[in-house]
Amino acid sequence: MITLKPATPADIPFIVAAEQHDDITPYIIPWAQQEHRHSFEDADIQYFMVMRSADGATVGYVILAGLKDIHDSIEFQRLVITEQGQGYGNATMAYVKRYAFTELNAHRLWLDVKEHNTRARRLYEKHGFIVEGTLRECLKVNDQYQSLVVMSLLKNEYLAQV
């Protein structure tokens, strides 16, 4: 259904445009091109482009951080799918878990998600992520405070799934 390929700086225009989409912006904190360029230069961060297998069209991207973390804890920093409702998010989650635990040898894969992003939270729970807690009203967006839910999956939990 999908393949993931390492992103390059040439992918930044797609990434920035995706973050500006009305269906996506309420659920993330969009970055400017310069922030993404800076992240591409950081060896601790890795971007992947999500490609539809049928025709190679780009349908999203992923950012992983903490690749050099001494505690083997990888942050699933961002998942953006531009063509929602097609199963691409589900397929991408499976790929990221496999990659984090088998290729990067992570002990822990974690993320934070806006509390009101129930669709994403259901996806993460479906993939075995456990709620660790809530960072209450830690973000100020348009003069409104929003909370983040921290979730994680441990390697032994992942291995029990496969």
Image: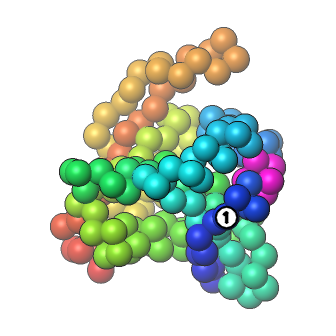
Q: Is residue 63 magenta?
A: no
Seen from the viewer's position, the closer of residues 22 and 14 is: 14
Quarter in which the C terminus is drawn: bottom left
Residue 122 in sight: no
In the rendered image, which quarter is residue 4 located in?
bottom right
Whole-percent x, y for residue 72 in the image: 25, 56
Q: Is residue 56 above or below residue 24?
A: below
Q: Main secondary structure of the magenta part?
A: helix
Residue at (40, 64) in percent of width and height:
127
Q: Residue furthest top?
A: 143
Q: How many marks?
A: 1
Seen from the viewer's position, the closer of residues 29 and 162 is: 29
Whole-percent x, y for residue 6 in the image: 59, 70
Mark 1 closeness class: few <14, some 14–19, many ≥20 residues within 10 Å? few
Residue at (23, 51) in percent of width and height:
70
Left or right side of 52 for 114? left
The amino acid type, in three-letter code, at marker 1 is: Thr
Secondary structure under tag 1 reads: loop
Q: Is residue 17 magenta?
A: yes
Residue 32 in sight: yes
Q: Which residues are magenta?
A: 13-18
Seen from the viewer's position, the closer of residues 121 and 61 is: 61
Q: Residue furthest left?
A: 156
Q: Is residue 52 above or below residue 73?
A: below
Pointer 1 residue: 8
Residue at (33, 54) in percent of width and height:
68
Whole-percent x, y for residue 153 in the image: 30, 57
In the rendered image, which quarter is residue 85 located in?
bottom right
Left or right side of 74 for 116? right
Quarter in which the N terminus is drawn: bottom right
Q: Is residue 82 above or below residue 150?
A: below
